[in-house]
Amino acid sequence: MTKEHDTWRPAPRSAGRKTRNAEGRDPREVRLARPRQGETGPAEGVIAGRNAVTEALQSGRSLNKIYLRAGVQGGSIAKIQALAKERGVPVEAARPEKLDQLAGGIRHQGVAALAAPVAFSTLEDALARAAEKGEDPFLLLLDELQDPQNVGALIRSADAAGVHGVLLPKRHGSPLNAVVDKVSAGAVSYVPIVSIGNISQTLQSLKERGFWVAGADMDGSEPYYKARLTGPMVLVVGAEGKGLGRLVKETCDILVRIPMAGGVNSLNASAAGAILLYEVVRQRQLEREAAAAEADRIGGKP
């Protein structure tokens, strides 16, 4: 007996008019999004099919990346490429096997996109958050971290430490996906996540706006507890293994290290980042306490 979803047929339509279902969608799109028996469907956060990806781009949905089958062409593909360029979404060529895996067996038509679990914020959103709290801006920038476990753990620590925004590069880093969301324990919904382009250029722009940029580096010039980590601050944590990129190091105002007293010579990115985040918190608290004490002294209070 034929399965119900195999007997679906688009309803007749008038010439020149697209037929829509009760939800306002073209029935052909619904068919593409419905796995057949034995199929798993798209992986979490994956949008598959030309129409679905085009709609996601046009609606402004936050996308991490778009995969196109190498050599695929056509009017709809050109439109997707143009929209992706306009939105600043990276596009990468992919083998058919990768697209098949992402799509979970449904017809992807040579196109799949990775959607972020939450909408990206802008840098101005993050700075506005700091202004609303009456605090110096505090940003965390992750330099090409590949491991979503580390990215999620760092976002969770950043939220706990009161960071006003986490900056993630669009390329060469872990996408903001379901794994990151889960490991962050939902913190991605509370701390603004900002998608940025060139890291060095972003840091240089922030420095021109008065930010102090501190990079975590195992060969840093100062131990973290002796470095000045107050005022408008960007803390930069590098990728697992290779650390900060050369240009990023050169752009930082200071490189700080975490002294190691045991047999291993480094911590993983999430552990090191958590230590440095809370060093910023500690120094800010001491600064506030010193300012309050000075105000009391000037005011003649005991």
Image (tube, rainbow, N blue to C red):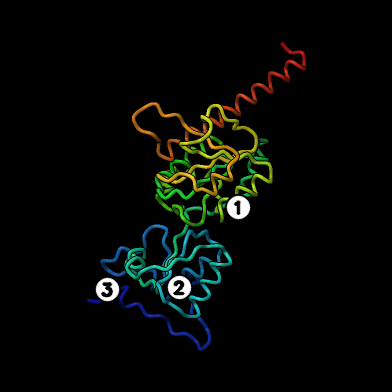
Report crowding for label 2: few under 14, some 14 to 19, many 20 or more residues within 10 A (C-alpha). many
Reading the chain from its start, which is encountered first: label 1 or label 2? Answer: 2
C-alpha distance separating marks 1 and 2: 33 Å
Measured as percent of width and height from the top left, residue 123 is found at 62, 50
Which image quadrant is residue 87 in? bottom right
Helix or strand or loop: what does disc 2 sit on?
helix
Which dot marks residue 3? 3
Helix or strand or loop: what does disc 3 sit on?
loop
Q: Nearer the observer, disc 3 or disc 1? A: 1
Amino acid bearing label 3: Lys
The residue drawn where x is 41% and y is 80% is 10
C-alpha distance separating marks 3 and 1: 55 Å
In the image, 241 versus 119, the foreground residue is 241
Q: Name the residue under label 2.
A: 50
Helix or strand or loop: what does disc 1 sit on?
helix
Q: Mark 1 points at which residue?
A: 201
